[in-house]
Image (spheres, rainbow, N blue to C red):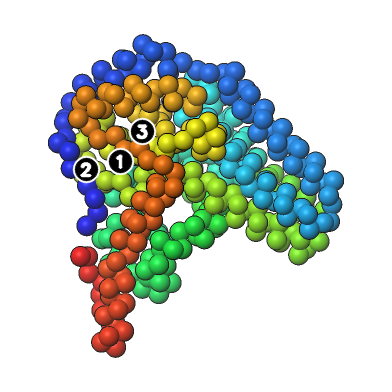
Amino acid sequence: MSASVRQRPKTTGSDFSTLNRQITEAGLLERRPAYYAVRASVVFALFAGTCFLFSLLGSSWWNIGVAALLGLIFAQAALLAHDVAHRQVFRTKRPSEIAGRIVANLAVGMSYGWWTEKHTRHHNNPNHDDLDPDVRPELLIWTTESAWGRRGVKGFVNRHQAGLFFPLLMLLGIDLRISSVKALRRPGMKRRGLEAGLMALHLIAYTAALLLVLSPLQALVFFLVHHAVFGVYLGMTFAPNHKGMPHPDGTEDYLRKQVLTARNVKGGRLTDVALGGLNYQIEHHLFPAMPTPNLPKAQPIVRAYCERAGVSYEETSLIESYRQALRHLHAVGAPLRAASRDRRARGGTVTPTVR
């Protein structure tokens, strides 16, 4: 069975209200425009410099290295769009949406509106089996109950999903594009004409650049390497945050729902930059609008408060966070592995059972 939040739930919001007052009085919810101006400028400069290097190298296999570099820059741009979507950069909706669509749709090639709606549902109910889209059973499964009826390709993947996790992340960048297109085909999607137009401009410019500068084979390899690095890097920034953590049952108050389902990743300034501040996942979930540079300042306040309130505060190294996530994936696939062994032993069909 999936893990659940076992600590005694409380129904009032008093615990969070007290913590929120401390954070507010410390000024940690104030905007940091200078930080984001520098961060955005650095990402833009790296992007522009990479494009210049791409054109300078021309039809050369050395440009495959540029593809890998561009994958890293795309991930950093996506992390910047994440902060914009949470209104960490701009206080109001309109400038946030303008900046978000420029970065996400035009620069990265994914739908800002689709991702924001999906990510908001995740924040509202992290790790909830029915309400969090990030743990919904798709190619990978995150709860043992999802193993029921899994056969064929999905069954094979789920039996070995711990070992396949990082290779599958290479497809994440392409999946984001496909999911964005599917979302923009739905009539209820807001500003879908604008978002589709911006994504089309991105696709046209990206494809034209590859075909005009590179040979067809080089263009194909560039595309694959670029999206593989982008997917792995982006996936590795999100994977440590909730995978393998308890799943709530809906009775928890806001403080416990956000803290008990998340884990922080220890590290220095390099970790902060590489993970875009998402290594402070607990603080980010408690205060989504808190600017990234304020998260490490909030951490000691939140950790001390959780200790006084008797709320478990999970923090581990980056490597250990991946180990925990992979162990969880391996355990979740156990019913399918057991069913596969039974089928081979009996020469028949056995439905996997949750053990």
Vertical relation: 31 (above or below) 215: above
Quarter holding residue 28: top left
User: Is the Cβ of the residue at disc 2 closer than 8 Å to that at disc 1?
Assistant: yes
The amino acid at mark 1 is: Thr
Residue designated by label 1? 261
* 333 horizontally vs 218: left or right: left
Using a 10 Å C-alpha cutoff, classify the residue at mark 1 as few (fewer than 14 neighbours), some (14 to 19) or many (20 or more). Answer: many
Q: Is residue 226 left or right of residue 170?
A: right
Task: Tell me the amino acid under the disc marked 2.
Answer: Val
Q: Earlier in the sequence, mark 2 or mark 3?
A: 2
57, 107: nearer the viewer: 57
Q: Is residue 91 left or right of residue 74?
A: left
| Residue nearer the viewer, 13 or 183 | 13
Give the residue displayed 79% in from the left and 47% down from the top: 54
Q: Position of residue 190 (x, y in %)?
A: 50, 38
Q: Which residue is mark 3?
A: 282
